[in-house]
Image (cartoon, rainbow, N blue to C red):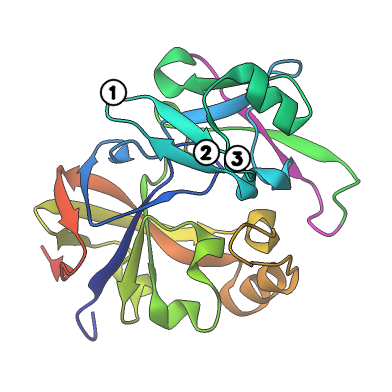
Amino acid sequence: MTAPLRVLEVWRFPVKSLLGERLDRAELGPEGVAGDRGWALFDVTTGFGLTARRVPELLFAAGRSRGDGTVEVVLPDGTVTSDDDVLSDWAGRRVALRPAAAVGGERRYEDPADPDDEAGRWDPFSGAGGAFHDNADARVTLLSTGTLGGWDRRRFRANVVLAGAGEDDLVGTRVGAGSAELDVVGRVPRCVMTTRPQAGGIGRDTGVLKTVHRERGGALAVGALVARPGVLAVGDVLRPV
């Protein structure tokens, strides 16, 4: 690290592809931030897990954790619910809100074959076991303000936003963050979700993904696995281990 990177924001996304919760502190374990991507909406007819790749409207609802380990969804009109019928009416399809522990076997999602042609072919892919991460390669994502530049950090759904620059240099190292330790395993490849509009005044912008591919080889942020469980908090400084 050329200069210390400090934790500026911590985020948990209780329901996959919905908006998340900003936290002051978070417990980190083998699945990443406790409660992160612990639930997902599934299309009852197709069996696919829903993401904002396929259903961009998901980014106008928010997931919210409850103290009993369940979640609720805040819809764009302010309705707060976890009822599948209410969620289905909003989504315009039969959906079921499911916890990761209740979904065994392969989790299947969809990705457009061509991000510029979303009316074209959609390819299925298999997600990670456990929490509903797209893959098991990383469970915590970290992104610095230096890398973000003028982009809104909410487009990239990082768990940890860092003040400073140079997170790419952490790849292949172990860092301490609060009482936790992270093995930084690689850069995070980006998909069409970064271009999606979402609540809070973020508009559709296909140039985001084109720029990431042109200038950064298609990756932005770094992904990590939790080597030592612990607590991370806003203000913590990353340190080499």
Residue appearing at x 24%, y 86% in the figure? 2
Tell me if 30 is positioned left or right of 150 in this view. left
Query: Where is residue 35, by image quadrant?
Result: top left
Q: Position of residue 176 (x, y in %)?
A: 14, 60
Q: Position of residue 76 (x, y in %)?
A: 63, 45
Which element type, helix, strand or loop, lies under badge 3? loop
Task: Estimate how packed mark 1 is, as few (under 14), some (14 to 19) or many (20 or more) residues with alpha carbons within 10 Å.
Answer: few
Which element type, helix, strand or loop, lies under badge 2? loop
Residue appearing at x 25%, y 53% in the figure? 183
Which element type, helix, strand or loop, lies under badge 1? loop
Task: Estimate how packed mark 3 is, as few (under 14), some (14 to 19) or many (20 or more) residues with alpha carbons within 10 Å.
Answer: some
Give the residue type at disc 3.
Leu
**Residue assigned mark 2:** 16
**Residue assigned mark 1:** 68
Task: Estimate how packed mark 2 is, as few (under 14), some (14 to 19) or many (20 or more) residues with alpha carbons within 10 Å.
Answer: many
Q: Is residue 48 visible?
A: no
Main SS class of the magenta portion in the image: loop
Which quadrant of the figure contains the C terminus? bottom left
Query: Where is residue 75, by image quadrant?
Result: top right
Magenta range is 104-116
Tell me if 133 is positioned left or right of 53 in this view. left
Q: How far is disc 2 from disc 1 in space, using C-alphas?
A: 19 Å
Q: How far is disc 1 from disc 3 in space, using C-alphas?
A: 21 Å
Which quadrant of the figure contains the N terminus? bottom left
Residue appearing at x 87%, y 41% in the figure? 121
**Residue assigned mark 3:** 75
